[in-house]
Image (tube, rainbow, N blue to C red):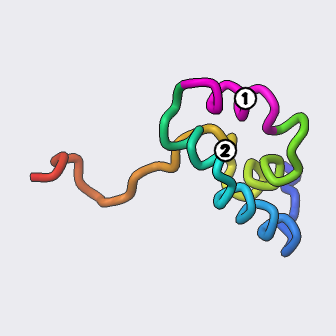
Amino acid sequence: MQTEEITDKDLAKAKQCLECPLCKRARDKQKGLVFWFVKKLESGFCPACKAYEKVYKRKAHQPIPKTGGTNDAGR
């Protein structure tokens, strides 16, 4: 299995995607016009979204997984 090497340029562009107001809103809300826009155009148009997918192994519109270690939902 061949894996692509993640470069410093990829990391910088992935960081751009993390900070992008459109992508951030799409990840947070998971619905609406901005979500649809990011979902349809991310990997075909935006180099930052492509880099995000390469670095984090998920699409730019997908929510960032919550970390915490328990499933107690705040208990």
Residue 54 percent across, percent down from the top left:
78, 52
For residue 40, what is the image quadrant?
top right
Give neighbour class at mark 2: few <14, some 14-19, many 20+ (Cα, 10 Å): some
- Taking the spot 71% from the left edge, 65% from the top edge, the residue there is 15
Residue 72 position within the rendered picture, expressed as x and y whole percent measured from the top left:
16, 48
Q: Is residue 52 above or below residue 46?
A: below
Q: Nearer the viewer, residue 65 or 36?
A: 36
Q: Which residue is mark 2?
A: 22
Q: Amino acid at mark 2?
A: Leu
| Residue type, label 1 | Phe
- Residue drawn at (38%, 58%), measured in percent from left and top? 67
Left or right: 27 as drawn, with respect to 19 = left
- x%, y% of residue 61? 63, 38
Task: Indicate yes or no whether the magenta region holds residue 9.
Answer: no
Q: Is residue 73 left or right of residue 64?
A: left
Give the magenta-colored segment's residue range: 32-42
Q: Residue furthest bottom?
A: 8
User: Considering the numbered disc 1 on the image, is that residue within a helix, a strand or a loop?
Assistant: helix
Judged left or right of residue 71, residue 12 is right
Is 37 drawn above or below residue 73 in the view shown? above
When asked about the image quadrant of residue 37, the answer is top right
Tag 2 near tag 1, CB within 8 Å? yes
Q: Which mark is residue 37?
A: 1
Whether the magenta-drawn stretch holds residue 35 is answered as yes
